[in-house]
Image (cartoon, rainbow, N blue to C red):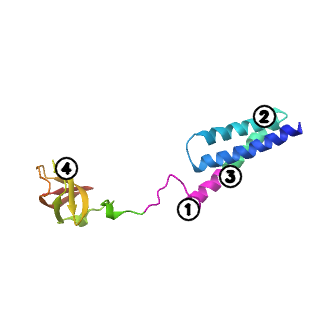
Amino acid sequence: MEGLMIVGIVLFVIGFILLGIEMVVPGFGIPGVSGIICLVVGIFLTADTIEKGIIILLIILALLGIMFAIILKLLSAGKLKSPLILKDELNTESGFISSNDLNYLLGKKGTAATDLRPAGRGSFDGVEFNVMSDSKYITKGTPIEIYKVEGSKLIVK
């Protein structure tokens, strides 16, 4: 009986480690399913009665809640790296700029980087933006000017 207790405790430890991995790398994958199986088998090996099994289950759930809160706090504080959050800086050299207010581009002159039929790309000081002509076809290389900004749309003529 004591050997089964040790195996049950080892399964609890393995289950908690696997579920911790699942909390950091989300998805209901192999670590999560394996961790749940280890915890359930650990309960069956260590509990003598149904009442003890329920008590062990409640303790496990409480410990998982505490573990989840700790991991969430570490992730939000940046002390633990999450594979879901990108930390790369904005690379403006590649031509991508994200902005909600594009009014600073009003009156900017550039050239059509692609044919505008009526939408396409325009190059302004070496940075390309998605632009839209005012219902006219504009060929690539034609000088253009931004004369209207509607939300994130840049209208050129």
Q: Earlier in the sequence, mark 2 or mark 3?
A: 2
Distance CA(mark 4)–CA(mark 2) = 64 Å
Distance CA(mark 1)–CA(mark 3) = 18 Å
Distance CA(mark 3)–CA(mark 4) = 52 Å
Q: Earlier in the sequence, mark 1 or mark 2?
A: 2
Q: Which residue is mark 4?
A: 119
Task: Give above or below for 151 relative to 6.
Answer: below
Neighbor class of circle 1 (other Cα within 10 Å; few <14, some 14-19, many 20+) is: few
Residue 101 in the figure: left or right of residue 139: right
Residue 83 in magenta stretch: yes
Please name the amino acid that badge 1 sits on: Gly
Q: Earlier in the sequence, mark 3 or mark 4?
A: 3
Determine the secondary structure under disc 4.
strand
Camera-side residue: 26 or 69? 26
Neighbor class of circle 2 (other Cα within 10 Å; few <14, some 14-19, many 20+) is: some
Residue stretch in magenta:
67-88
Neighbor class of circle 3 (other Cα within 10 Å; few <14, some 14-19, many 20+) is: few
Q: Earlier in the sequence, mark 4 or mark 1?
A: 1
Q: Which residue is mark 2?
A: 44
Quarter of the rendering containing residue 56: top right
Q: Is residue 45 visible?
A: yes
Residue 11 spot, x, y in % from top left: 75, 41
Q: Which residue is mark 1?
A: 78
Determine the secondary structure under disc 2.
helix
Q: Quadrant of the N terminus?
A: top right
Q: Is residue 61 visible?
A: no
Task: Give above or below for 3 relative to 102.
Answer: above
